[in-house]
Amino acid sequence: MFVSDCLGLNELGHLTIGGRDTVELAQAYGTPLYVMDENEIRRACTSYRESIQKYYEGRGLVTYASKAFCCKAICNIAKEEGVGLDVVSIGELYTAQQVAFPAERIFFHGNNKTVEELLAALEYGVGQIVVDNLGELELLNQLAISQKKKANIIFRIKPGIDAHTHDFVRTGQIDSKFGLALETGEALEAVKQALSMEGIRLKGLHCHIGSQIFDIEPFEHAAEVMLHFMADIKEQTGAELEILDLGGGFGIKYLPEHDPVEYDRYMQKVSETVKRTCDARNFATPYIVIEPGRSIVGPAGITLYTVGAVKEIPQVRTYVSIDGGMGDNPRYILYQSAYEAMVANKAAQPKSKEVTIAGKCCESGDLIGERMPIQEVQPGDIIAVLATGAYNYSMASNYNRIPRPPVVMLRDGKDRLVVKRESLEDLVRNDLL
Ligand code: LLP
């Protein structure tokens, strides 16, 4: 009935998350409020880990892409779950360091890492710096030598897969700001240079084909392309790279009609493809890394808002204004992303209305969604927007000087604050006259 397993209904007809009444949580912490169910997050980690165990003899690592939702609490959960961590800035790395996240399980991404970021990664001993381009390779080599260290790297490669069309478009892949191109010879050149560099230890390759993908075929195809390249590298240089990182991108259920693939099936199919391709090329099966972000935290989160004005424009539409909006969820204004919403205090009632949920920013496009089916709604009601655990808090802003909401985490039904609500003082903290 609900888009996420952690959601339900109680005897009052209220929406629950992790078994807790959302209306009570809204009263206790105020709105807008992000609520996340830690049990759901841990279940997703377990499910990914088990699928690697089952289909790939455990020779791989689930690495949580922290850009989806980054704070100390989630880094600590990832640490406890034994998964890796994908970071893409010094800020995400710093957050990981705050919980003493094991450096060898960190992957440092980014198409334009600064000197400061590369030095921080070397200093912390990051297990995999994902090198994006030849300039970065050269810079990192120099920095590593100057620090009397060897940088452990994997290369980001553009495998040339268009995941969103079903059609494995083989042109246009060069037009991406991320990674090294295969067909121009740039990627092979980078590998050769890396193998000869004193400050560099090349461990493997990485690719990431997109996000919110529902099909398995593009992932299988990417694995094939990457493995052929690894086999070519072995033939041409003698180097046998040990890590193949296939990125993230697994789709989640935002709407009842979405039908994402089970994580289990993804690993089953990709493992088969990897083994088959390695067999064909007489190449040892690599250690596989996958980097899910959205599918680990997305379904575990909801956002709660209080309804203010309800504006019915006859023959046009009904605007329901909430006390949040694009500041805490910019995904509609950015991508016209679809969400399911419901009136949390009337969740058992039928959805008899269709409304536009509007935020409070001075911006007409500040909407959570249009034509959203919802229960009868009045000022004072609590609206829950579902599956907001990924790319909401992490992409939030202070536009219009609106403080960002807090994050409440539930574990076995017990609530705790993991990110405090921003205060007005927080908003002016860095201001100078
Ligand atoms: N690995 C790399 C290198 C990535 O760039 C990403 C996402 C991931 C892993 C995790 O992908 P996921 O499993 O979460 O799909 N802001 C957008 C999504 C941007 C994704 C960027 N990279 C959104 O709100 O939909």
Image (cartoon, rainbow, N blue to C red):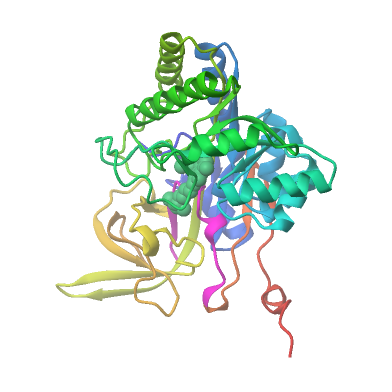
Residue 396 forms part of the magenta stretch: yes
Question: What's the residue at 61%, 49% (across, down)?
Answer: 88
Q: As drawn, which residue projects farthest toward the bottom?
A: 433
Q: Is residue 333 left or right of residue 406?
A: left
* Residue 223 percent location from the top left of the image: 43, 26
Q: In this view, does 432 lie above or below 398?
A: below
* Residue 206 percent location from the top left of the image: 53, 34
Relative depth, front residue between 50 and 61? 61
* Residue 363 percent location from the top left of the image: 39, 77
* Residue 240 percent location from the top left of the image: 59, 20
Q: Is residue 311 left or right of residue 344?
A: left
Residue 230 forms part of the magenta stretch: no
| Image-quadrant location for residue 412 | top right
User: Can residue 411 be seen?
Assistant: no
Q: Quadrant of the N terminus?
A: top left
Q: In this view, does 322 lie to the left or right of 422?
A: left
Q: Magenta span covers which residues?
A: 380-399
